[in-house]
Image (tube, rainbow, N blue to C red):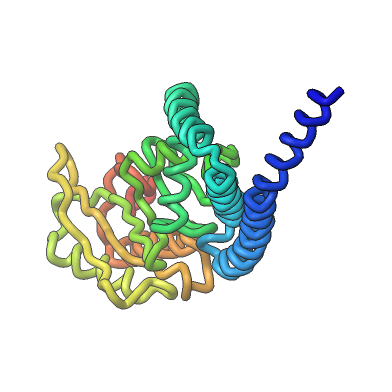
Amino acid sequence: MDFIRESLYADWQAFLSFSPRLLYAAALLILFAIVARIVRFVLGKVLARSDHLKPLTRFLSRLVTWAITIIGLLLALGVMGFTGIAASLLATGGVVAIVLGFAFREIGENLFAGIFLAFSRPFEIGDLVKTGDLTGTVKAIDIRSVHIRTYDASDVFVPSSQIFSQELFNYTRDGLRRPSFSIGIDYQDEPEQVVALLEQTVRAVDNVADEPRAFVTIDEFAASFVVYKVYFWLDITQSSRDLTEVSNDVKIACWRALKDAGMTFSTDVSTAIELRNAGGE
């Protein structure tokens, strides 16, 4: 009986001597938990104000919360004298991180690529972009993928790592688009007159940008006709009509101007417009 009493007394005394450290560790945990909540709340408010960083709000808030909580836990273990356990947790965490890194390499790549894309922001929602062989309009930007809608109405979710690692073409970043088309004209017609007439006609079409100025090049000397290529610019942020409508306006205006001028169209127009001979043959 005396032995049990002495053991209990010794344990009680040990607990009393250890209790200040325990209270200090508990206070540290509570303090860091409160700090984590405050930082998460403030970070969420700040990120939510930015359209660029809004997709990162949930991810970064959780990341910061977990980081602060783990730091508080390690400090609490150190205060209680469990430095060996704290060191073991750090070492184990490092090993686990390496294993998970290899196991979920693609997921990790997409997450980090998504973060970098959110900060660098090479495109916005609504931009027309091309990555690899895929061209379409950006509909949504997430951490792990980018939602792109193609011209054939397909919804494609492209991994962020693919966009980050490949060349990205943004056709609408400055609002300017440069359509072009080719047309064949008979060798009889003077090239200078054809170029001048096409340039004058294109520049007069509504919604075609004044700068950069539209221009025409002689693209190819085919077997029976000369191929002219017409280039012009459209500012989609200022135009009252979309790209397809303005392109059609330009092509129709060129067709009418060439026909009125008595130019002879080729019977095999190259890429963009199919026109008949001016004489109606």
Relative vertical location of residue 152 with respect to residue 243 in this rendering, above or below:
above
Based on the displayed image, in which of its 4 quarters is residue 149 positioned?
A: top right
Q: Would residue 192 appear left or right of 214 to someone viewing this image?
A: left
* Image quadrant in which you'd find residue 77: top right
Q: Quadrant of the C terminus?
A: top left
* Residue drawn at 59 percent across, 39 percent down: 155
Residue at 20% over, 50% down = 186
Instruction: Give the camera-side residue of 269 and 277.
Output: 269
Q: Is residue 150 visible?
A: no
Q: Position of residue 257 (x, y in %)?
A: 33, 66
Residue extending farthest to the front is: 2
How many labels, in total? 0
* Residue at x-position 33% and y-position 52%: 279
Residue 75 is left or right of residue 5, and the answer is: left
280 with respect to 25 (left or right): left
* Residue 128 screen position, x and y as percent: 46, 54
Which residue is drawn at the image coordinates 63% and 50% (left, top)?
21
Q: Specify whether residue 2 is in view.
A: yes
Q: Nearer the viewer, residue 103 or 244?
A: 103
Query: In the rendered view, does 214 fall on the left or right side of 236?
Result: left
State the image coordinates of residue 80 (x, y, percent, origin top left). 59, 44
Along the viewing direction, whichever of 30 and 200 lies nearer the viewer: 30
Compared to residue 1, the image places residue 203 above or below, namely below
Quarter holding the N terminus is top right
